[in-house]
Image (cartoon, rainbow, N blue to C red):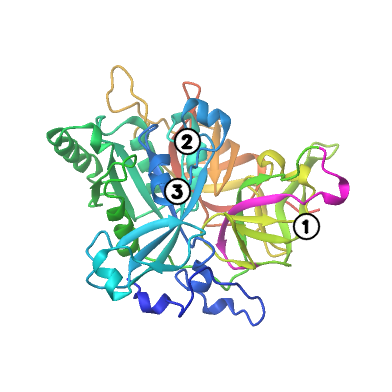
Amino acid sequence: MTSTSSITVPGHEGLIEQQLEGFDHTKLTPISIEAMSRQATINIGTIGHVAHGKSTVVKSLSGVRTVRFKTELERNITIKLGYANAKIYRCSNASCPRPACYQSHGSSHPDKFPCEQEECKEENAHMVVQRHVSFVDCPGHDILMATMLNGAAVMDAALLLVAGNETCPQPQTSEHLAAVEIMKLKNILILQNKIDLVKEAEAAAQYEQIRNFIQGTVADGAPIIPISAQLKYNIDMVCEYLCNKIPVPIRDFSSSPRLIVIRSFDVNKPGTEVDSLKGGIAGGSILQGVLKVGDEIEVRPGIITKDKAGRIQCAPIKSRIVTLHAENNDLKFAVPGGLIGVGTKIDPTLTRADRLVGQVLGHTNQLPEIYTELEISFFLLRRLLGVKTDGDKKGSKVKKLAKGEILMVNIGSTSTGGRVIATQNDLAKIVLTSPVCTMEGEKLALSRRVDKHWRLIGWGQIRRGVTLAIE
């Protein structure tokens, strides 16, 4: 736990102004106040079955509604990945009662403000920011598993939501937990939500169900906190856990920056005059390195075309960073963690409607190779998760990979089709439908089409592959 004194800025009540002059990124850590004041530095996913309260938990912690699209509001489900940042504070008075000494507020909230507890007013105690967290709100619906996997690529920890008024596990509860296991996430907190809707005996019985369900999984031994996201019961306990039990991730600030694009859009309104046009925006999470305003950047694979012979060609998009944003906070530099909006000079037609999703952004000529064919070592699940058949309550068995079959491959924030051209034991060669910017050693998830839905069947690691010459 970081002591409050180590991140208190004397007399500073608002947000820290970032300076590029004399800036030394090697001295930054994910809990440096210079990095943490304006942007989130830790990513926490909310996972679980559809309608178990993932978006409501994020709203109660951050004050931000992640369901932003008309189709999502009408159907009351998350379809795209939602993002919201929250600052988590702790009172500087050691005798402030817990868990009330922990609070969470939105990203633009000051780094320090007076504590409202009676005993703390006399001490002139302040709430001081301890963590700045970005919540990755994943869809729970089975047909949106690919979107959930894209979000899992950037998570440092996860909140697994289980509704107190339903039996555990529900189909996507198992599927999401398996996906988190693939991503090697070890820090999981289980939230038993909607506790206000059930009697105490029912809640206690479900608590045991959850304990049995997580036995032998990556979540074995994870704390289970009963909450009501709607009424904000026990939300301060969640804040305390996020501060004390989830370790600060190890970040690489010195390598060449690499950002995986999870959203991209055009901010120009219809009818904007040519002189007033703004360049395209790429939103994503920085995996390593530091991006600064004014940096020359490149997006790979970029524009994908085919020549007359049908061979795929890639032309990376080159541009310059004009602005950097984390929610409503403007930045001069951005570090790993949280969702960063990168304002560029790219033609906005190339970034409109998430066209750059799955691409990688970084410094010119310093990004990984572009692959069209992968050789992977893989591991298949024993049974299909989230699918129940009449004769088999546990789900149907996963068949071996067959030569010629089509799979969906998730690498980072990329979802692409892949055709298996060879398989032997736990090795396979896959030709990708569209080229991917990745590197050897990168993890990937494999899904197969079952009953018109893509279902998670296993995961793998890239050993080598066929790369594409860049135009």
Sequence-wise first label, 1 or 2: 2
Q: Which residue is mark 3?
A: 63
Amino acid carrying mark 2 in the image: Met
Do residues under tags 3 and 2 come within 8 Å of each other at their CB atoms?
no
Instruction: Tell me the SS state at disc 2.
Output: helix
Residue closer to the observer: 200 or 212: 200
- Location of the N terminus by quadrant is bottom left
Q: Which residue is mark 2?
A: 145
Q: Identify the residue at horizontal 44%, vertical 51% (top origin).
A: 62
Q: Position of residue 201 (x, y in %)?
A: 12, 34
Q: Which residue is mark 1?
A: 318
Tell me, for residue 409, which label it has, or none. none
Amino acid carrying mark 1 in the image: Lys
Q: In the image as oriented, which residue stretches furthest toward the bottom?
A: 22
Amino acid carrying mark 3 in the image: Gly
Q: Position of residue 6 (x, y in %)?
A: 40, 79
Is 167 positioned to the left or the right of 40 in the image?
left
Which range of residues does the magenta coloring cover? Answer: 271-291
State which quadrant residue 47 falls in.
Answer: top left
Instruction: Please say whether residue 290 is one of the residues in the magenta stretch.
Output: yes
State which quadrant residue 5 falls in.
Answer: bottom left
Do residues under tags 1 and 2 come within 8 Å of each other at their CB atoms?
no
